[in-house]
Every structure is written in structure tokens, then in C-alpha cells.
Amino acid sequence: MAVVDTVRGFGVTFRHLFKKPVTQQYPEYKRPVYPRFRGRHLLHRHENGLEKCVGCSLCAAACPADCIRVVAAENTPEERYSAGERYARIYEINMSRCIFCGYCELACPFDAITLGNDYELAELSRDAMVYTKEMLLAPQPASRRTPVAPRDPYDVPSQDGVAGRTSLQ
Amino acid sequence: MPDGFIVTVIKSFALVNMVMLVFALMTWIERRLIGRFQVRYGPNRVGPGGVLQPIADLGKLLRKESIIPAGSSPVLYLAAPAVSLFASLAVFGVIPFGEQATIPFTDWKIFLYIADVNVALLLIFALGSFSFYGFLVGGWASSSKYSLYGSMRAVAQLVSYEVALTMAVIGVVMMSQSLSLIGIVQAQERDGIWYIVPQFAGFVIYLLASTAEVSRIPFDLPEAEGELVAGYHTEYGGMRWAMYQNAEFVATIAFSALASILFLGGYDGPFLPGPVWMLLKMALFLFLMIWIRSTLPRVRYDRLMIIGWKVLLPAATLNLLVTAAVVVWVD
């Protein structure tokens, strides 16, 4: 009967009043991203501190959104930046254009660029969306670090495997 | 005005501001409560627990551009929300929160109501209908189809439910032999029973009809957002829109107060002082309104009319006849 069902509906809503909300309080709680999540790019260094990037521009060539700009320069014995002959004097990624496809990561012969897990990329102006080499090289600040879900449940290559390329070091 | 002119002016000023404060808090409480009913939090960011959310809303609304739609009637368009808000606020002039109280640390006695009108109940229903002029005129003046539909629905709903509402209340009037709200409370004290017990049918009818009267879910057809964008206030923005919301919510608070007085004995209650009882009972009814809102879907328009004319009106009439017979028989 309609009236009985209506009254039962009140019981249902009243029970829900005392349940713990399922909302995830975002800035305080960050839901772990998938292990293969593709977020903001990171440029990497060798253990000795030299940049892995040699300024070959293969990432820029692979980029479907055309958002990477690389200007290479020669290393000199006095000013040595990378392990190769050349280094990226300018390395910029326009984050307002990037589609986070990860092709740059695939194209890179030295694993110098990977896609990290930072997705909080809001800025107050379009100019600020152009990320420079310094920003991309810098280690991710702890405040911007996102938890990553455990790898085991997902189809992710093993970290110590030879063939496996992992994007989230 | 039992207190004289100056004290009454001060009391009115304080009362209007308190009603506005309660309205602001209620918008937050309603959103929080509906959030919890839906297993989420609701606004909890601004201030402790989100309690300053109304102030943030106010700041946003104040900065909105003031628009007068092309083809509208500017004077009516601007005046309509004020009419509704005035009518809703004016109801509080006759609502008693207690009889007489001494201001602490003095022996100055004041009355806890603005005026004891001997036809207070009639006045409240008249003002309730008057606030619909704001809805009707506002919807018509904004020269929009949705607004006009909203106003037409509002008026049709008012006509259908005002009858049942009045009929339901007459049962209480017959039992208390008074149209004054203070008289009704005193009658309940005298009879030693709150009228929710002998007038339970009237109470249920009152609850349904007053929900329709203040156009809240499930009877919010005048502003059914799924069908009419926002009904009569489609073309309103900023503070004028806020005035309509304000009018509606203040009317809800006023009808909660009226329900407390008519059926739960108003400020009558043991142990606690009268105004506290009154506020507790009002809070109960406001919670009930929010509970209803988070439970029931909006009724279809034809069913709204069926409920009004074929269910509530006959039920209220029957209740009236039975009450009349009992009152005469007891006498």
C-alpha cells in the first residue's frame, strides 16, 4: 500500500541519518592513484647528479599535443649538465596542452622523463601552466605527493624485472 | 501592543533579526542534515563544521549582478520579492513565545509576543495568502514562460490547500473557543492536553497542507527545478532571489511555530521555561520538514490536485464535523 510504503521510506532515510558518510574529504584524504596513473611529468637525474636528458627532442617529436619545447646546447667540461654530449638548455612542457598520453615517456631513449602521480595542476594564469626544466627536475614536494595504490592487484610490470619499465619510481 | 510603542519597536527589531539569524542557520542545518540523510557531509568547510556557510553564501549573492530582464515590468519585478518576504516576516508579529518574562537583573517585565490579536489565526492565513501575491506578481513580471507557469502553479496550489488547511485548523479553534494564539495555548493548558491527541487527524492534514502552503518538497511544484528551471524565481538572481528563498524559509519557520502552538501546546511544558519549549517544538517541526524533504519525491501535478481536493478536503471536513459534534455533546 502506498501509505505504508511511504512510511517505510521515512524509516529508511532515518536509518541513513546515523550512518557514517561515504564522502572522501579530498584535500585531507587523497585517494591512492593507480600504479600506472599518468600525472605531471618528472625529469630525472643519474645517481651522480647529472641530468638524464640529453636534449634529443624525441619526446617533442612524439608529443601529439605539441606541448614540449626542447632547446639543446653542448655540454662543456666546465659546465656539464648531462651525461651525453648535449643537454636540454630549455625544457618546457605546456601543461594546459598536455593530454597525459605518456608518449614522451615511451619515446625517451634514456628514461629521462616519466609521468608522475601529481594531478593538482591548477594555476592562476595560463603563463604559469608552462612548466620549466627547474620545476620538472625538482623532487616532488611532500605536500603534492599522492599516495599510490599497491601494485599487486594491477597488471604492472615488476619493478626489478629487466623488461619492465616502471613509470612510478 | 501590550508593552507600549517604544518597547514594541525594539522587540520587533530584535525579533526580525532573530528570525533572520535562525533562517541563515537553518539553511546550513538543512543542507547538513540532508547531506547526512544521503550519507554525505554537506557544507562543512567554512568555519567550524561549516556554520559560517550562510555568510559565504551571502557574500556571493551580494556580489551578483542585478539584472532586470528585457520585457519585464521593472517596478513589479523589483517589488515582488519584498512583498513575499514582508508577508512571511509579518506572521511573527502575532506568534507568542511565552507570556510574560522578567529581564534578568532587573524587575522589568515584558511580554514575549509583539501583539495578542484576537483574530491572530485569521491574520496568519491572510498573510500566508498575501505572500503568494509576491510569487504571482514576480512570476508574471519577469516575462518568462517558466516563471509564469511557476506562479500559476503556486496560486493553484494555494487555492487547493488553503481550504484544507483552514478546515483542519478550525477543529482546534472549536476546541479552544479562541482565534488568538495565546488563547489557544491557554486553552490547552486549561484542558490539560495538547491538541495533537484529540485532533490527530487535523494535525496530519495541517502538516500536509502547510507543507504545500510553503511549497516545500514533496509539494514544491511552483519551483519544480526538473520541469520549470526554478518556477516563479527563474529570472531572479542575487539578493532578490535570496529574498524569495528567505520568504519561503521564514514561512516554513512560521508554520512550524504555528504547528507547535496549535497542536503541541506552544510554550506550554513542564520544567523548562516557555520560550525554550516553544523553540524545541519549532525545531522538531523543522526537522520533520527536512526529513520529509529528504524522503519523498515531488508529487505529480494532477496528484497534487487529487490529494488536495479529494483526500485532504473531505478528511478535514469530516474531522470538522466530528469535532463539532463532540464539542457540542461534551458541552
Image (cartoon, coloured by chain):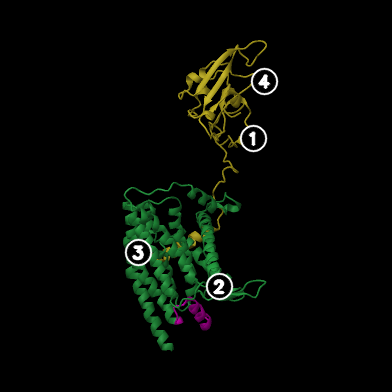
Chain colours: A yellow, B green
Magenta: predominant secondary structure element?
helix
Asked whether residue B259 is drawn in magenta, I would say no
What is the magenta range?
B176-194
Quick one: label 2, few (<14), some, or many (20+) residues within 10 Å?
Answer: some
Residue indicated by mark 2: B112
**Please, what is the three-letter code of the amino acid marked with disc 1?**
Ala
Which label number is shown at residue B157?
3
Residue B311 on image: x %, y %: 35, 70
Considering only vertical position in the picture, is B182 above or below B136?
Answer: below
Q: Secondary structure at mark 2?
A: loop
Residue located beneath label 4 in the image: A49
Same chain letter for marks 1 and 3: no
Rendered view: B131 above or below A132: below
* Horizontal arrangement in the rendering, residue A78 relative to residue B313 (left or right): right
**Residue at horizontal 39 percent and vertical 61 percent from the top:** B219
Q: CA gap, disc 1 to disc 4?
A: 21 Å
